[in-house]
Amino acid sequence: MTAFRWPAWLNAIGLMIASFVGISALSLQARPDTEVVAVAFPPWWSTQDVFSAVASANAAFVRATAVSSILVVQPDRSNGLERLREAGAWLTIDPQSVAACFTNKRKEI
C-alpha cells in the first residue's frame, strides 16, 4: 500500500502564502495613536452586526468600503483599538493602505 505524499511545490506555496499574510498583517497594522482606522470584522457578519460592534466600542463611523465587513472608523481616545478588538474586530488597518483596494465610489449610505 502506497502512502500519500504532498508534492514538494505545495510546501513552498504554503510557506509563501503564510509569509505574505504575516508581512501584510504587520505592515498594514494601525498604530495605537492613529485617529482613523479601517476595521475588518468577520465576513459572515451582517451590516447591522458590524455597525453594532462599532457602536458598542464607542467608535465614530467615518465611511464604508466596498466590502461590508470593513469600515473606516474613528476609535474612542481611551483604549479605542482595544475596545474594537473586544467588539469582534479581527484587524485594525491603516485606512490609506486599504483605500485603493476597497473603495466603492458608487456606494451611498
Image (cartoon, helix red, strand yellow):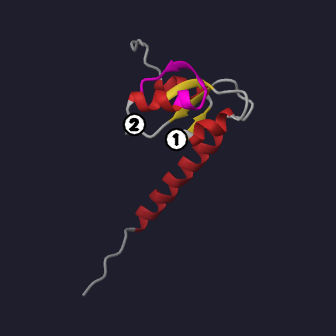
Q: Residues within 10 Å of mark 1 (few under 14, many from 20)?
A: some
Q: Residue at x 59, y 36 (%)?
A: 84
User: Circle 2 sits in a helix, a strand or a loop, which is it?
Assistant: loop
Q: Would residue 29 be visible to someone looking at this image?
A: no
Q: Amino acid at mark 2?
A: Trp
Q: Which residue is labeled 1 in the image?
A: 88
User: Circle 1 sits in a helix, a strand or a loop, which is it?
Assistant: loop
Which residue is more in the foreground, 75 or 65? 75
Would residue 79 be found to the left or right of residue 99 on screen? right
Instruction: Name the residue furthest bottom.
Output: 1
Give me the C-alpha separation between circle 2 and circle 1. Answer: 10 Å
The range drawn in magenta is 54-69
Residue 64: within the magenta? yes
Q: Residues within 10 Å of mark 2 (few under 14, many from 20)?
A: few
Residue 61 higher or lower than 85, as above or below: above
Q: Which residue is labeled 2 in the image?
A: 45
Which residue is more in the foreground, 91 or 78? 78
Residue 66 locus on image (x, y percent): 42, 24
Q: Residue at x 58, y 49 (%)?
A: 22
Q: Are marks 2 and 1 in contact (CB under 8 Å)?
A: yes
Q: Amino acid at mark 1?
A: Gly
Q: Residue at x 46, y 31 (%)?
A: 50
Which residue is more in the foreground, 53 or 37? 53
Q: Locate the N terminus and report the quarter of the image it occupies.
A: bottom left
Residue 88 locus on image (x, y percent): 52, 41
> Which numbered circle lies on residue 47?
none
Q: Locate the C terminus and report the quarter of the image it occupies.
A: top left
Would residue 95 be found to the left or right of residue 43 on screen? right
